Amino acid sequence: MSDGVKVIAKNKRARHDYHVVDSVEAGIVLKGTEVKSARLGKVQLVDGFAKIQGGELYLHGVHISPYEQGNRFNVEPRRTRKLLMHRVEIARLERQVMEKGMALIPLSVYLKRGRVKVEIGVCRGKKTYDKRETIRRRDAERDAERALRSRTRGDD
């Protein structure tokens, strides 16, 4: 990502456990010290998911560590946070999620023009054999890359 975008946290586990069908950007409602903590990269997305409740989008299970100098202004690290999107976009997401086996998973958190944004993926769960196939394909690509590199070095 470019254009003044600084990635704060990535959910590597999401791409391992899910097929990402679609992804969208959403703003996130944070309280004062949470923004400072997020800027320092103290965000964990591993157990996070998004849910549509009453026509609004909420982020659950994301851990933003308390800011060390925040004292009494710190809030609970795993609280539910509201995500900001247009009503039409939320309705489109809701239609996609109604399909069998679809979930809204946070893929990354980043700063864009000074604002904290969340990339939400519309994901379908992978089966165990899909995960093995992904690992097998990645290993094959890595081996091919190594072989290609060693050939080019040998030609010098």
Image (tube, grey):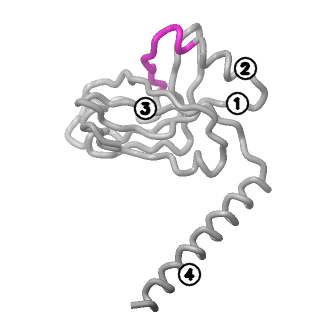
- Label whose residue precedes the other's in the sequence (4 or 3): 3
Marks 2 and 1: in contact by CB < 8 Å? yes
Q: Position of residue 63 (x, y in %)?
A: 45, 39
Q: Secondary structure at mark 1?
A: strand
Q: Position of residue 142 (x, y in %)?
A: 57, 71
52 relative position to 3: left or right: right
Residue where numbered disc 4 is placed? 147
141 relative position to 133: left or right: left
102 relative position to 113: left or right: right
Rounded to the nearest whole Å, what is the CA distance between mark 1 and mark 4?
Answer: 39 Å
Q: Residue furthest front?
A: 155
Q: Residue furthest left?
A: 69
Q: Which mark is residue 102?
A: 1
Rounded to the nearest whole Å, what is the CA distance between mark 4 and mark 3?
Answer: 38 Å
Which amino acid type is marked by label 1?
A: Met
- Label whose residue precedes the other's in the sequence (4 or 2): 2
Residue where numbered disc 3 is placed? 118
Q: Is residue 71 above or below residue 154?
A: above
Which amino acid type is marked by label 4?
A: Ala
Rounded to the nearest whole Å, what is the CA distance between mark 3 and mark 2?
Answer: 21 Å
Q: Position of residue 52 (x, y in %)?
A: 59, 17
Which amino acid type is marked by label 2?
A: Met
Rounded to the nearest whole Å, what is the CA distance between mark 3 and mark 1?
Answer: 18 Å
- Label whose residue precedes the other's in the sequence (1 or 4): 1
| Front position in the image: 115 or 51 | 115
